Image (cartoon, rainbow, N blue to C red):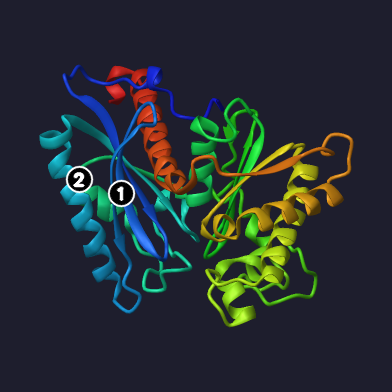
Amino acid sequence: MPSDSPDSTEVDAAPSDRRDVVLAIDINGGHFQAGLVTAKGELIDRATVAVEPDVGPESHYTALAMMVSEFRGVSAEHHDVRIRGVGIGSEGPVRQGLDAVSPVGLPAWREFPLRDRLSELTGLPVFGDLDAKALALAEGWLGAAQGHPDFCAITVSTAIAGGIVLDGQLLEGETGSAGHVGHMVVEPGGRRCRCGTQGCLDAEASGLAIEAITGRPPSEPTYEIMQRTGGLVGRAAAMLCNAFDLTLVVVGGSVASGFGATFFHTAQVALDENARLPYSRGARITPSRLGESGPIIGAGALGWRGVRRAARSSRTQPPNAR
């Protein structure tokens, strides 16, 4: 398990007869999810709200807030648990700590102050990050990367993003944006990306890109588009393995999981063809072991990591600084 993953033995909880949980929230363009996640990664309740595409930012927030409030109401009464904090994994772009979110699949939210709004609503500490970084924590904690201190997780969904773990630590970067693998160029001179360059993985293989290229939703792919998407993701995975000395890439997201075996076989072939250095040869690409639970478990992992860090910081501060 990466050392950056949640560890219940490090959570400094006040004495309580109730089991501690975090309220985990997953934000993407299709739906909002929320659930209660224990310090051991058990998902003890879960709910989903569909995102209405043609409403304003406050309507989206109201739908999320109602679900959050319902969970706060039932946590003690029905589950006999105490919520220690809120963890959020969000489709990007996001600002560090989710000070603001602009999910590509949710156009109404642009620079939406999600952390402050949820902190005000719940009165709890709120911790969040990019959805792919949340997935990386989850897969290292309970999924396909257990026991691997060095790996990458990629989400292939409406957009494409990634989270990179080295020496057991999730890479953050100067602004918290490390892992944006969707902006690696895989088709020089290819389609114009929203970032301004051409041929980015996100512009060529994301759900939005597939719909723009084919005129069909990614849920209705041709065999050729499944192969092409897998090949492009495998090419990007090889670049990561070559650059960061990795031998494992875990892939999740609705597009990858929906394309299934065709996607993963083609991705592995492309990885084999392009990762040929002595240390990257033999690298493998594998589906998320957590499946559709990965995003919400990942949000829970972010929440527990934040709770753990806050407890540690409190213990190390001198009394007059508290």
Q: Quadrant of the C terminus?
A: top left
As helix, strand or loop, the secondary structure at mark 1 comes to: strand
Q: Which of the pair 193/235 is nearer the observer? A: 235
Residue annotated with mark 1: 34
Name the residue: 88% across, 44% down. 276
Residue 5: tell me if it is visible: yes
273 on left or right of 135 = right
Q: Dot 2: few (<14), some (14–19), or many (≥20) neighbours within 10 Å?
A: many
Q: Farthest left residue?
A: 77
Residue 236: tell me if it is visible: no
Q: Position of residue 100 (x, y in %)?
A: 40, 59
Residue annotated with mark 2: 71
Instruction: Tell me the distance, in whole angstroms, between the alpha carbons under discs 1 and 2.
Output: 8 Å
As helix, strand or loop, the secondary structure at mark 2 comes to: helix
| Figure check: 131 above or below 12 | below
Q: Earlier in the sequence, mark 1 or mark 2?
A: 1
Name the residue: 83% across, 46% down. 275
Asked if the residue under mark 2 is in contact with the one under mark 1, i.e. CB atoms within 8 Å, the reply is yes
Q: Looking at the picture, which amino acid does disc 2 mark?
A: Phe
Q: Position of residue 128 (x, y in %)?
A: 40, 46
Name the residue: 55% across, 25% down. 1
Q: Position of residue 318 (x, y in %)?
A: 34, 18
126 on left or right of 3 = left
Q: Dividing the picture into quarters, in which one does residue 18 lie?
A: top left
Q: Which of the pair 58/264 is nearer the observer? A: 264
| Figure check: 177 above or below 203 | above
